[in-house]
Image: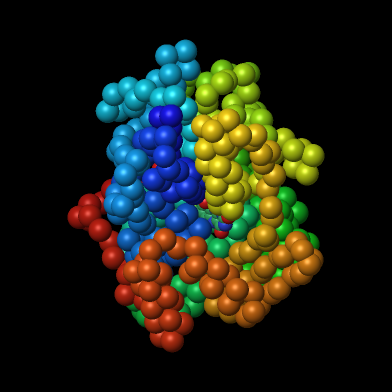
Amino acid sequence: MKVVIAGAGFGGLKLARKLSNKKGIEVVLVDRYNFHQFQPLFYQVATAGLDASNISFPLRKIFQKSKNVRIRLASITEVKPTENKLVTSIGDIDYDVLVLATGAATNFFGNRELADHSFPMKSTLDALQLRRGLLLNFEKALIEKDPLELQSRMNIVVVGGGPTGTEVSGALAEMKKHVLPKDYPELDFSKMNIYLLEGANKTLAAMSNQSSIDSCRYLEKLGVTVMTETLVKDYDGKNVLLQDGKTIPSKTVIWAAGIKGNIPAGIDKNMIARGNRIRVDRYSKVINQENIYAIGDLAYMETPKYPNGHPQLAAAAIQQGKLLAENLQNKVVAKPLEEFEYFDKGSMATVGRNLAVVDIPKPRLHLGGFLAWLTWMTLHLMLILGVKNRFFVFINWLYSYATYDQSLRLIFGEYKDEPQ
Ligand SMILES: Cc1cc2nc3c(=O)[nH]c(=O)nc-3n(C[C@H](O)[C@H](O)[C@H](O)COP(=O)(O)OP(=O)(O)OC[C@H]3O[C@@H](n4cnc5c(N)ncnc54)[C@H](O)[C@@H]3O)c2cc1C
């Protein structure tokens, strides 16, 4: 059975690892990057807390000892279900079984202006671009003569109060407090404003009410202006236009307000559900397809426990990848298949130094503050791939905890007076 896996994110990688060295199965793992990205820590790369290489892991190294997993570096463009072919930038790849695990991309809800002018955070490259943009912004602020222009450089707007928006806002607030005044002593950081805009009536709306309350309190304690029930209508690179007509002048807008499934062409439009996700059955098989599966952020599976689909989280993608590996092996030996259901082990988000929130469903428990922060750090350390990466992340965290600093504020690429 030749299994082609499109995407080496949390779901695709788990599936490939579980199928590695399994008899009767050949695996081709296709991704546009030659490394796996640990998305939960993108915000630390973006705010110069971690080096990008610390949260990236080369795919070829993971499968060095595998006899049946082949890696292909390619961009996936289309699926041809009738021909059993995956169309990629390096040519067509034949499959017996295709697993789509291409995750999700930033959703700007069709607003071209927003997409052109704001910073997304959906890849390591996005995180590095944001770091560059943030640092260049302050370099430009130093030489700004016009007070209004200067203020718009000192205003950072984060859109979306989910875990990504909350975490990046907290990290920016810590930079404002501990790092930026030392790096740019000529600037008055009392004038720096960090706005977190959220459409719902609370931050971390998918977590417990207590986590929402705590996260908002922590952010405000760190000096972030949290604006709930606030919708962004447009952004032209200078002013953020809100639904109520008000504007916030800002040269730096971080967009963390939505994602949509990364679906290659060739998938039946009737199989596409809310959020641009592909409808799958309880075995992750795309509805009306015999040999095409979808897992992770891209997949939309309705179950009695999750009638609106599973949460788009790393844990759900990993669990789907793991079960699909078992089911594909069961298929080879004609054993019965097992239905998927997501096992929620809990959710968490960190806001800043000693400040985090953790929700555990069973037994129902909410942690906040230092204990939650320690839990968050331990779990993320455990999840990072590779002993070396784990070690470097730990050392980095220890160093910045002790010194309130980091030495990763590098602006790569020659500086030209470029438009943002
Ligand atoms: C900033 C951020 C923070 C997050 N924090 C958390 C968290 O704390 N906890 C949590 O559980 N979840 C978190 N998530 C969500 C989590 O990362 C996703 O749910 C998870 O990555 C989904 O896994 P996946 O395998 O479906 O897709 P992904 O992990 O996104 O993998 C998709 C893969 O497909 C590849 N790909 C996509 N399109 C193509 C193409 N056309 N051609 C070739 N390759 C392609 C990509 O390069 C990528 O390697 C976070 C996400 C972001 C963006």
Q: Residue at x 27, y 28 (%)?
A: 90
Residue 277 x, y percent position in the rendering: 59, 32
Q: Residue furthest bottom?
A: 402
Taking 252 as reference, is 231 above or below it? Answer: above
Q: Quadrant of residue 23?
A: top left
Taking 291 as reference, is 388 above or below it? Answer: below
Residue 39 x, y percent position in the rendering: 47, 54
Q: Residue at x 72, y 65 (%)?
A: 360
**Quick check: can you spot residue 43?**
no
Front one among 25 and 420: 25
Front one among 297 and 100: 100
Residue 71 x, y percent position in the rendering: 31, 40
Q: Residue furthest left?
A: 414
- Quarter of the image with the N terminus is top left
Q: Residue at x 37, y 23 (%)?
A: 94
Taking 100 as reference, is 384 above or below it? Answer: below
Q: How is the image coloured?
A: rainbow
Residue 327 x, y percent position in the rendering: 58, 38
Q: Quadrant of residue 7?
A: top left
Mark count: 0
Front one among 198 and 285: 285
Q: Residue at x 56, y 42 (%)?
A: 326
Taking 310 as reference, is 265 above or below it? Answer: above
**Quick check: can you spot residue 279?**
yes
In the drawing, does residue 176 fall left or right of residue 198? left
